[in-house]
Image: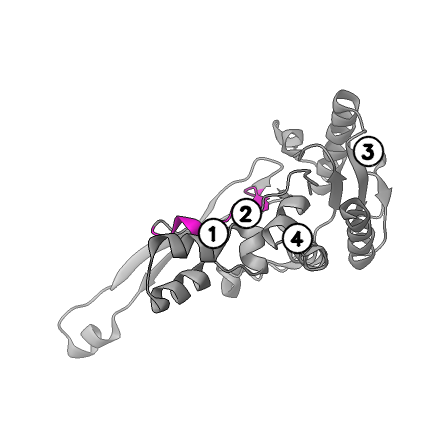
């Protein structure tokens, strides 16, 4: 998570509408389009026909990727058209296709610019802190529901690392530029060690002046020196980070 210094001020919806001299109904519609809630403040919004409603999101989400080589498996399936079969006009499958699956140890990364979030909320710091806490909680605990009926992918991260920075976001995805090798212990231990080593390399190169606070938690029982303080429990980790954000926003 990144703590930015620049705050993006929000524009005045009423001024933009008045300049075009529109009627009351259109004025009301435009004001609704230009209004903001927590989701818009965090993830942004773009409407091609109403540029005044555009909001630059405070959240950046990276694609999850496996820390090791992963093989895609094909699940071949067919579907039968029952109506045509009952009428006796056709036989065979009504549809044929395949689903592609993989099972891997994933690295996921996201960045939240807190100052931009508060700016998108018209300076409402209290709401910004609430959104920050909920974003952290959701990023860790939420699993996308696609294909859930056939995969039940309700896992919990082995490691969660949060860094509050005053300079710029830093992704550690480079730790897996070369794939973690297979071993009898699986991929998790080596993936965690690789992340710790890569974080240490960043500290040596960039220094730690930009780190306001960084800490980690998760299912893994060991501590990782380059990932800051180990905190037992997700809620305790979120509280520690949000408290530090609140001090920076004062």
Q: Earlier in the sequence, mark 1 or mark 2?
A: 1
Residue at 35% over, 69% down: 25
Residue indicated by mark 2: 57
Residue indicated by mark 1: 45
Mark 1 falls on what kind of element? Answer: loop
Mark 1–mark 2 CB contact (< 8 Å): yes
The answer to whether residue 126 is seen in the rendering is yes
Q: Earlier in the sequence, mark 3 or mark 1?
A: 1
Question: Mark number for residue 226?
Answer: 3
Q: CA distance from mark 2 to mark 3?
A: 30 Å
Residue indicated by mark 4: 123
In depth, the one of 211 and 155 nearer the eye is 211
Q: CA distance from mark 1 to mark 4?
A: 18 Å
In depth, the one of 227 and 165 nearer the eye is 165
Q: Earlier in the sequence, mark 4 or mark 3?
A: 4
Mark 2 falls on what kind of element? Answer: loop
In depth, the one of 238 and 106 nearer the eye is 238
Q: Earlier in the sequence, mark 2 or mark 3?
A: 2
Above or below, 7 against 42 in this view is above
- For the N terminus, give its image quadrant: top right
Mark 4 falls on what kind of element? Answer: loop
The image position of residue 240, as x and y in percent, is 83, 51
């Amino acid at each position: 998570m990144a703590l930015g210094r620049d705050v993006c001020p929000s524009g005045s919806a009423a001024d933009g509408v008045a300049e075009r001299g529109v009627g009351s109904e259109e004025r009301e519609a435009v004001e609704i389009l230009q209004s903001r809630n927590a989701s818009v403040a965090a993830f942004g919004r773009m409407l091609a026909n109403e540029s005044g409603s555009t909001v630059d999101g405070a959240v950046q989400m990276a694609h999850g990727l496996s820390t090791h080589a992963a093989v895609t498996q094909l699940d071949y399936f067919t579907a039968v058209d029952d109506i045509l079969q009952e009428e006796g006009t056709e036989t065979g499958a009504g549809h044929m296709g395949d689903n592609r699956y993989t099972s891997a140890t994933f690295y996921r990364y996201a960045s939240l610019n807190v100052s931009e979030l508060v700016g998108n909320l018209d300076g409402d710091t209290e709401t910004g802190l609430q959104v920050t806490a909920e974003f952290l909680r959701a990023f860790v605990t939420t699993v996308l529901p696609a294909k859930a009926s056939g995969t039940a992918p309700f896992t919990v991260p082995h490691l969660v690392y949060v860094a509050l920075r005053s300079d710029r976001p830093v992704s550690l995805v480079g730790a897996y530029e070369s794939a973690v090798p297979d071993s009898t212990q699986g991929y998790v231990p080596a993936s965690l060690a690789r992340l710790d080593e890569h974080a240490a390399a960043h500290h040596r190169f960039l220094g730690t002046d930009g780190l306001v606070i960084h800490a980690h938690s998760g299912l893994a029982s060991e501590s990782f020196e380059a990932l800051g303080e180990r905190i037992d429990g997700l809620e305790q980790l979120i509280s520690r980070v949000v408290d530090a954000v609140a001090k920076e926003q004062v």
